[in-house]
């Protein structure tokens, strides 16, 4: 397929080599308004506005993935395969599955388990373990160390369900899974297949253990540390 795609109307070259991807289009807009200079709208399709600008002189793009593996699957595929993007850094929110991972802490997804069937398209003769780019992860952890934020590095669960009738999400905690979100595994699989780089960074927005929650406004507009770490390593 060539550009434009069914979901992105930008021209080749409109995106930077690194794209920051929150799930939420309004979190993308917040980053553009607060951190980028000379930002240009490169994709308005479906209201999933994508922008390219500069951060401390470095070209960087920001565009939402939408929610869930199918949506992340589409956007990351098109960016990697049709727009010459090399790095996608997800900057999301996630629910904590561990007592020592508190609201507003940061989690880096070294790997991402999933309950989705996304991997089946690759027709592998076994299970695939989706992992982050070691280089991006290493840089992000260094940036987190410098900022002295409270963070953890480990395994995520990328779930197909936000409201899960089985009520069994906590079962993943016994395997050391840090938190649940809905996109990292698709991003890591698409990056692996394309030979590109990906990292998911999440700020803990709620706790599956305690029931504590942040507001939708906080999920959209705060979580600055995660945004700044992603911009620094872009
Ligand atoms: O805040 P974002 O990046 O959208 O991430 C999380 O929030 C959404 C669910 O509320 C899902 O997309 C999940 O992965
Ligand atoms: O997918 C998500 C994101 C935040 N919190 C959750 O519980 N799930």
Image (tube, rainbow, N blue to C red):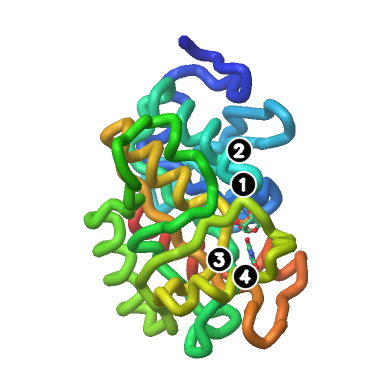
Cα distance in 3D space between marks 1 and 3: 12 Å
- Which label belongs to residue 180? 3
Residue 121, quarter of the rendered image: top left
Q: Secondary structure at mark 3?
A: strand
Which one is in front in this view, the residue at disc 2 or the one at disc 3? 3
List x then y, in percent, for residue 99.
52, 89
Q: Is mark 3 within 8 Å of ligand 2?
A: yes
Q: What residue do we see at 38% from left, 54% from top? A: 199
Residue 88, quarter of the rendered image: top left
Image region (quadrant) for ligand 2: bottom right
Residue to which mark 1 is pinned: 68
Mark 1 neighbour class, 10 Å CA radius: few under 14, some 14 to 19, many 20 or more: many
Q: What residue do we see at 57% from left, 78% from top? A: 104
Earlier sequence position, callout 4 versus callout 3: 4
Residue to which mark 4 is pinned: 168
Q: Is mark 1 within 8 Å of ligand 1?
A: yes
Question: Badges 1 and 2: C-beta atoms under 8 Å apart?
Answer: yes
Q: What residue do we see at 58% from left, 56% from top? A: 159
Which one is in front in this view, the residue at disc 4 or the one at disc 1? 4
Q: What residue do we see at 71% from left, 70% from top? A: 218
Cα distance in 3D space between marks 4 and 2: 24 Å
Which one is in front in this view, the residue at disc 4 or the one at disc 3? 4
Earlier sequence position, callout 4 versus callout 2: 2
Earlier sequence position, callout 2 versus callout 3: 2
Q: Secondary structure at mark 2?
A: helix
List x then y, in percent, for residue 63.
57, 41
- Which label belongs to residue 185? none
Which one is in front in this view, the residue at disc 4 or the one at disc 2? 4
Question: Badges 4 and 1: C-beta atoms under 8 Å apart?
Answer: no
Residue to which mark 2 is pinned: 71
């Amino acid at each position: 397929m060539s550009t434009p795609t069914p979901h992105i109307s930008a021209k080749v070259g409109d995106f930077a080599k690194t794209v920051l991807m929150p799930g939420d289009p309004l979190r993308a807009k917040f980053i553009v308004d607060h951190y980028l200079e000379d930002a240009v709208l490169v994709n308005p399709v479906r209201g999933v506005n994508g922008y390219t600008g500069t951060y401390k002189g470095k070209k960087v793009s920001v565009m939402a993935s939408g929610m869930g593996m199918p949506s992340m699957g589409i956007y990351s595929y098109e960016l990697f395969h049709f727009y010459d993007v090399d790095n996608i850094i997800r900057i999301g929110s996630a629910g904590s599955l561990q007592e020592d991972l508190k609201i507003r802490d940061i989690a880096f997804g070294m790997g991402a388990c999933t309950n989705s069937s996304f991997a089946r398209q690759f027709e592998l003769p076994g299970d695939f373990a989706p992992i982050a780019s070691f280089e991006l992860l290493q840089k992000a952890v260094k940036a987190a160390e410098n900022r002295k934020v409270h963070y953890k590095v480990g395994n995520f669960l990328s779930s197909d369900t936000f409201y899960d009738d089985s009520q069994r999400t906590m079962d993943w905690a016994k395997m050391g899974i840090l938190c649940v979100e809905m996109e990292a595994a698709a991003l890591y699989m698409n990056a692996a297949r394309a030979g590109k780089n990906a990292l998911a960074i999440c700020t803990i927005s709620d706790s599956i253990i305690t029931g504590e929650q942040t507001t939708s406004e906080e999920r959209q507009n705060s979580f600055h540390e995660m945004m700044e770490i992603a911009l620094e390593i872009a």
